[in-house]
Amino acid sequence: MLAQLSRRAISRAFVNAGLECRVSGRANLSTCVKRPAIYAVQSEEEFQEKVMGGSKPVVIDFSATWCGPCKMLTPRLEAAITATEDTVDLAIVDIDDLGDLAMEFDVSAVPTVLGVKDGKVVDRFVGLIDEDKLGAFINNLKQ
């Protein structure tokens, strides 16, 4: 029981540090990888701090819960961001909750995706795009 409690405590510490770890076997071997930041923006203040003031490039997914194409695109974005191994973050903005942000960034249709680097919008697309174009969009942010 003590070993399990300490495993849980260690696991929580790794998660809080942004690491995803797996313990395998009786030898208690673990492997850890840095998790990319994928988060739903809750306020304009959080948006300014994490997205516009962040140190890494950020993909902003302006979407809505009622939007069918958004439901298809968001998981694809999450997978593509995870593949970057913590070099690009993903911020999901619900336009129904943060409509002022959507207006500020000229979002007139969803899904609209923006690429932000050093606090400036450097690229954007509207609607669904092919996997190769999505990969190129994200790779351009990493450079």
Image (cartoon, rainbow, N blue to C red):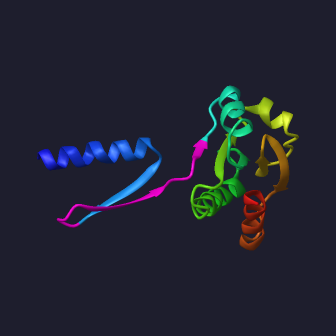
Residue 49: horizontal and vertical position, in percent? 68, 31
Question: Residue at image x 80%, y 58%?
Answer: 127
Q: Is residue 143 left or right of residue 91?
A: right
Number of marks present in the image shown: 0
Q: Is residue 111 above or below residue 41?
A: below
Residue that appears at 85% across and 34% down: 103
Q: In the image, is 58 to the left or to the right of 21?
A: right
Residue 17 versus residue 133 in the image, above or below: above
Q: Quadrant of residue 94?
A: top right
Q: Position of residue 10 (x, y in %)?
A: 29, 46
Q: Is residue 133 magenta?
A: no
Residue depicted at x 21% and y 67%: 25
Q: Residue furthest top?
A: 45
Which residue is farthest left?
Answer: 1
Residue 9: % across, % down: 27, 42
Residue, far bottom: 132
Horizontal placement of 62 versus 25: left or right? Answer: right
Place residue 105 in its image quadrant. top right
Is 36 in the magenta?
Answer: yes
Magenta segment boundaries in residue numbering: 25-39
Q: Quadrant of the C terminus?
A: bottom right
Give 31 or 123, whichever is nearer the viewer.
Answer: 31
Residue 23 placement (x, y as % from top left)? 29, 60
